[in-house]
Amino acid sequence: MPSVIEIGPVLAWSSKDRSVRRFYPQLDGLRAVAISLVLITHCEDLKLPAALAYLASMGWIGVDAFFVLSGFLITGILLRSEPGLRAFGRFALRRTLRTWPLYFSVLFVAYLALRLHGSGEQVDWLQHVFFLQNYSPEFFARSLTPTWSLCVEEHFYLLWPFLIFFLPRRALPWTLSVLFFALPGVRYWGLHHAFTYKQLYTETQFHLDGLVAGSIVAVLISRYAIPLGVMIRIAYVCLILGFGTAFLGFWRNWGESKGQNVLFGFTSLAVAFAGLLLLLLLRETSLLGKVFSLGWMRYIGRISYGIYILNDGVIAILSRAPLHRIVGPVGDSWYFVSAMRIGLSICVAALSYRFFESPILRFKDRLR
C-alpha cells in the first residue's frame, strides 16, 4: 500500500497528514438535495400528481441524508481535536451556537402562539427545553414536529466526543461497525417489546444508522491510506446496494412507519448516502461534484437548517390563511399551495440566516 495517496485537489492521506477537511462545497449541495426531499414530503397532504405524490411519500429520507452528513462532519471535527476537557468545551460551545439560537427562538414563538390553543396545552414544553421531545408518544404541534431529529443530533453531540476521545483510535472502526450492524437487531427487539413505529423512528437509540455511517466515512478518510480506486469501488457498491435495497423495499410498501422499513430501511439508506458522500468527496471535479457545487445549491444547503426548522411553522400559518379568498380558486390548487409553502420557507430562512444566524456564526468561527 503506498504511503501517500493524492485524490485530485480533495483528499490526501499519509502518515503525517490524515485529516478530514473543514469545508467541502459539494456537501452544501447534498444538504440542498436533502432539504428539498423534506420540503416535498411536507406537501404530502396536498392532492399532488401521482409522480410527485410518490416522491413525497419517500421525501422523509432527506433526514437520513442529514444524519450521514452530521456523522461525517462532527466525527471529522473530533478527530482533528486533541482529546481533553478544553476541546470538548469548545466543541460543545460551537455546536450550541449553531443550533440553539434559532431553535429556542422558534420554541418561544411557538409557545406564545399555542399557549391559548388546545394543541399547546398538550405540548410538554419542558421536554422541548431539554431536547427530549423525540421520546414523546406523539406530536401535538405541527410547527415543532421537525425538532425530533434535532434531538437525535443533540444527543449525538453530547455523547459522541467521549467515544472519539477516549476510545483507542485503532478500535474505532471495529466499534463503529459493530454498532452499525447491531442497530437492526436493536429495532427488532423494540418492535417486539411494545415500542410503536413512531418511537422506533424518532427515539435516538433506534435511529443512529446515518450518524454512525457518516462517522465510519470520516474514520476511513482520517486513519487509512486506501487507494483511490478501492475507495471509489466501495462508494459505488454502497450506493448501489443501499439505494437498491431501499427502493426495492419501497416498492414492497416500506414506509417510514412500516415494520420492515423500521428494521432495515434506515440501514439501507445510511449505506446509500454514505456511498454518495464518498463519491462527492473523491470526485469533487467530476460532473456530479460540479452539479452539487453550483452556487444556488450551495446557498440552499447553507440555509437548510433554517428551512428545516421553520418550514412546518410556515405551513401552520398558511393553513390558517384564506388563500382562496385572496387569489380565487387557484388558492386551493396543489401547485399554488406547494409553491407558497416552499417559496415562503426559503425566504424566511434566508432572512433568518442573513440577519440572525450569520452574526452568531461569525462569532462561532472565531472559536476555531
Image (cartoon, helix red, strand yellow):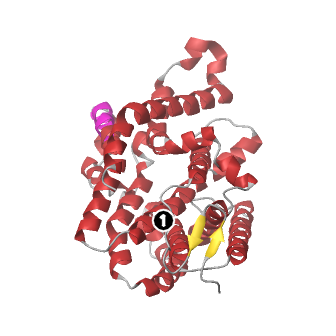
Asked which quadrant contains residue 156, the reply is bottom left
Q: Nearer the viewer, residue 147 or 12?
A: 12
Q: Residue at x 68, y 65 (%)?
A: 246
Direction from residue 294 to residue 132 in the image, left or right: left
Q: Residue at x 28, y 38 (%)?
A: 108
Residue 108 drawn in magenta: yes
In the picture shown, does residue 41 fall above or below 330?
A: below
State the predominant SS element of the stretch in magenta.
helix
In the picture shown, does residue 34 fall above or below 73?
A: above
Residue at the spot of label 1: 71
Whether residue 50 is visible to the viewer of this picture, yes or no, is yes
Q: Nearer the viewer, residue 225 or 364?
A: 225
Count of numbered circles on the image? 1
Direction from residue 211 to residue 99 in the image, left or right: left
- Provide residue 22's location: percent of width, then percent of height: 47, 58
Report helix, strand or loop for mark 1.
Answer: helix
Asked which quadrant contains residue 194, the reply is bottom left
- Provide residue 102's location: percent of width, then percent of height: 35, 41
- Provide residue 229's location: percent of width, then percent of height: 73, 75
Q: Residue at x 34, y 38 (%)?
A: 359
Whether residue 44 is visible to the viewer of this picture, yes or no, is no
- Provide residue 69's location: percent of width, then percent of height: 52, 60
Task: Identify the amino acid type marked 1.
Answer: Gly
Direction from residue 112 to residue 213 in the image, left or right: right
Residue 140 drawn in magenta: no
Task: Specify the quadrant that holds the C terminus.
Answer: bottom left
In the picture shown, does residue 316 fall above or below 308?
A: above
- Write down the region rendered in magenta: 107-115
Q: Residues within 10 Å of mark 1 (few under 14, many from 20)?
A: many
Task: Specify the quadrant that holds the N terminus.
Answer: bottom right
